[in-house]
Amino acid sequence: MRKNFPLVMLILLLTFIAAGCFSLAKGQFEMPFLNILASVSREAGLNLFPTVNVTPNQEAVLWHIRFPRTIIGLMVGAGLAVSGAVMQGLFSNPLADPGIIGVSSGASVGAVLAIAMGIAETSMYAMPACAFIGSLMAVAITVALAMRHGKIPVMTLLLSGVVVGMLLGAITAAIVTAVDENRMRQYLFWTVGGLGYRRWEHVFIGLGPILIGSGIMVLLARHLNVLVLGETEARSLGMPVGFYRMLFLSLAALVTATGVCISGNIGFIGLVVPHFLRLIVGPDHRRLLPACLLAGGAFLVFCDTMGRVLIAPTEIRVGIMTALLGTPYFLYLLRKSRLEE
């Protein structure tokens, strides 16, 4: 498969498109695919299917519910998978994920503070903004603790991330126990992760940071390959190691924080997807990162759609679905690696 990378990318692209179409068509309100094509063509001013009747209810569901939800799922899944692959490369650890430097913990503190103080009720942007600020502050604290004489040792950064995550987890738990039951339920609903009730405003919040951040990481994949060789080898090739390490950390943190702030905490995407694709396309990040971009988006949207249709009309939150689908595969990988030792 590694020799057939164009074929792999074509399959992933078709899967990416199919997952998006599946998400648009399926749910509590079934939408024939021909009606979707007719509505899209009319919005584009083409009217390629003049005989297809699209009802106002179908139009409303498609453009105000399904499209924003699907686009956010594709964006967030792609961003989390690329960020996870970058983190695993930087730490030379296949168990690393975007939350390892405190992004998710910081977002949780920001979100629960917004809920506890009533800020979340003032605007739809309030809780995502607080979660985003909390994420970036957590990353800044982690990096500040790890930095020594302008350098960031990988192991020190890892340990700093664990410590900061534990501290922020304790702060979050303390705040949650102090709020009333309704606000506690609101926080728990957010922390499970989900794409429901997302609107075009949420799409616009995430569009720039996720697409630009992920795009830059993909374009700099060659530099990440050099960093993976080790600090000594990278410096011998003339690479400013500290600059690129900080750049990749900042971009991964930005993309992850943006994803978390608009969709809540969604686990396993940044852990399982890069690990799985590394077995298919190899460790070269010039191939791995673009593959993660497509596979991550497709996987998250597929999980979200399955959560809507499995026990409809009840919806299973996408954070639960990614854990249910990701955990068995990850346990299989762990068992396989043990048998190979």
Image (cartoon, helix red, strand yellow):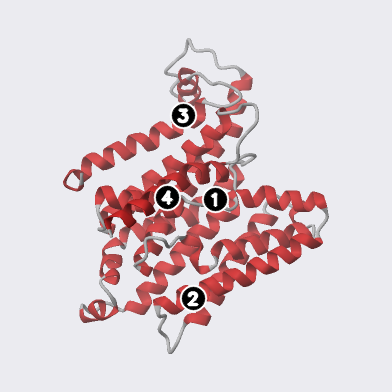
Q: Residues within 10 Å of mark 4 (few under 14, many from 20)?
A: few
Residue 190, horizontal then vertical, whole percent? 66, 50
Residue 96, horizontal then vertical, whole percent? 43, 63
Above-or-below relation of 286 to 170 = above
Q: Pointer 4: what residue? A: 331
Picture disc at residue 247:
none
**Residue 80 shows in this picture:** yes
Q: Which of the two discs, 1 and 4, sits closer to the camera?
A: 4
Q: Residue furthest bottom?
A: 149
Estimate the spatial distance between the alpha carbons at disc 2 and disc 4, rounded to whole Å: 24 Å
**Residue 79 shows in this picture:** no
Estimate the spatial distance between the alpha carbons at disc 3 and disc 1, rounded to whole Å: 20 Å
Tell me if label 1 and label 4 are in contact, CB under 8 Å: no
Foreground residue, 324 or 194? 324
Residue 269, horizontal then vertical, whole percent? 46, 50
Q: Pointer 2: what residue? A: 159
> Secondary structure beneath disc 2?
helix
> Secondary structure beneath disc 1?
loop
Give the residue type at disc 3.
Phe
At 43% from the left and 89% from the top, the residue drawn is 149
Q: Pointer 1: what residue? A: 266
At 54% from the left and 56% from the top, the residue drawn is 258
Horizontal side, residue 326 vs residue 62: left or right? left
Q: Which of the two discs, 2 and 4, sits closer to the camera?
A: 4
